Amino acid sequence: MKKEKLKEILACPKCQSKLVLQSDNFTCSSCGKVGQVEDSKFVFFKIDTEVSTASGFLSQCKEFIKTRFPKLYPQIIDWISPVYSSRKQAKWTLRGVDDAEKIILNLGSGCSDLSENVINVDIYPYKPADLLASIHSLPIASNSVDIILSIACLEHIEDPQRVVKEMYRILKPGGLIRCAIPFMQGIHGSPDDYQRYTPNGLKTLFKDFSVNEVRVSAGPASTLVWILQEWFAILLSFGIKPLYWFWYIIGFILSPIKLLDIFLNNHPMAEQIASVFAIEVRKK
């Protein structure tokens, strides 16, 4: 079902011409071969998962779990991550994804598979990924997508403005984007980490769209847990990096504190030190 939907909207990432699939190769009449089918995935661009481990020990651990236990990874993150992920926020993000008639993309999907109706797009060949492509230049026809989801992705993009322009191009008039991006979090490159956004920063990033809502996705308690975990690991490691990682792992015992965001997310001043903001915008 996903692959059939995807075939209908594929276009050359260079010139936007219609693509032809022959012998597992996607070809453009102007640009030649631009992609292929590998392991049932449509591949236009990919990075080996080994590359994402270059930033250190934590990335290596994450990639080990992602590649060997992809179904467990989201659950493990929910348990030990300092960031609170609520069912209420999940429902907000997934509104409308059960409509089988809609074309829905999850950009930077990682190991997640949110719905059988959501097409997963990433640059790493994780098991749930349907399309491997750079989100800077997507092999997707203009004005063809109903909903775009992007969860904890844009902070890892060097040029998010270019990506947002690409989102605008592929989205149908009236189409929606729901994006979650950190405000107060430590550096977490997998492999890179570039930026954080305030509510006004998000509105500026999506200035060509109509903004429906900006909301706190993970609040002050999540910020506190992240800072405490890093702070104690730095304080108690005395400049010794292996000892830092020992205390960092021990610091996961602080994670339950994030559950205070069940109450604090709704505080009128929660945005002052929120961990994550989410924004919904509509293409004009």
Image (cartoon, grey):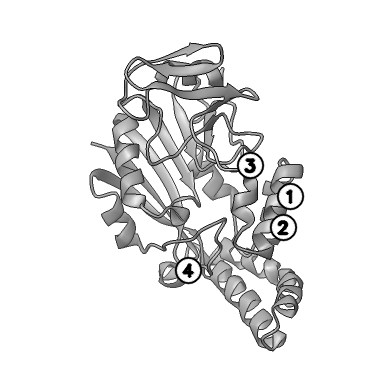
Give the mark nearer the N terminus: 3 vs 1.
1
Query: Disc 3 marks which amino acid?
Result: Cys
Q: Quadrant of residue 263?
A: bottom right
Q: Position of residue 39 (x, y in %)?
A: 65, 25
Mark 4 or 3: in front is 3
Q: Could you tell me how far apart the alpha carbons at marks 1 and 4 are, in whole angstroms?
A: 25 Å
3 vs 2, front mark: 2
C-alpha distance separating marks 3 and 2: 14 Å
| Label at residue 61 | 2
Tell me the kind of residue under disc 4.
Met
* Amino acid on which the number 1 mark rests in the picture: Ile
- Residue 270 position, x and y percent, is 45, 68
Residue at left 57%, top 70%? 221
Relative image position of residue 267 (x, y in whole percent): 46, 67
Marks 2/4: CA distance? 23 Å
Relative height, residue 46 to residue 62 (above, below): above
Badges 1 and 2: C-beta atoms under 8 Å apart?
yes
Q: Check disc 3 and report the residue beneath it.
A: 111
Viewer-side residue, 45 vs 152? 45
Q: Above or below — where is 138 with respect to 73? A: above
Mark 1 and mark 2: span between their CA atoms? 6 Å
Q: Which tag is nearer the camera, tag 2 or tag 4?
A: 2
At which x and y percent is residue 212?
Answer: 32, 46
Identify the residue at horizontal 41%, vertical 62% (top origin).
195
Badge 2 element = helix
Rendering quarter of residue 9: top left
Residue identifier under label 1 = 65
Which residue is disc 4 drawn over? 184
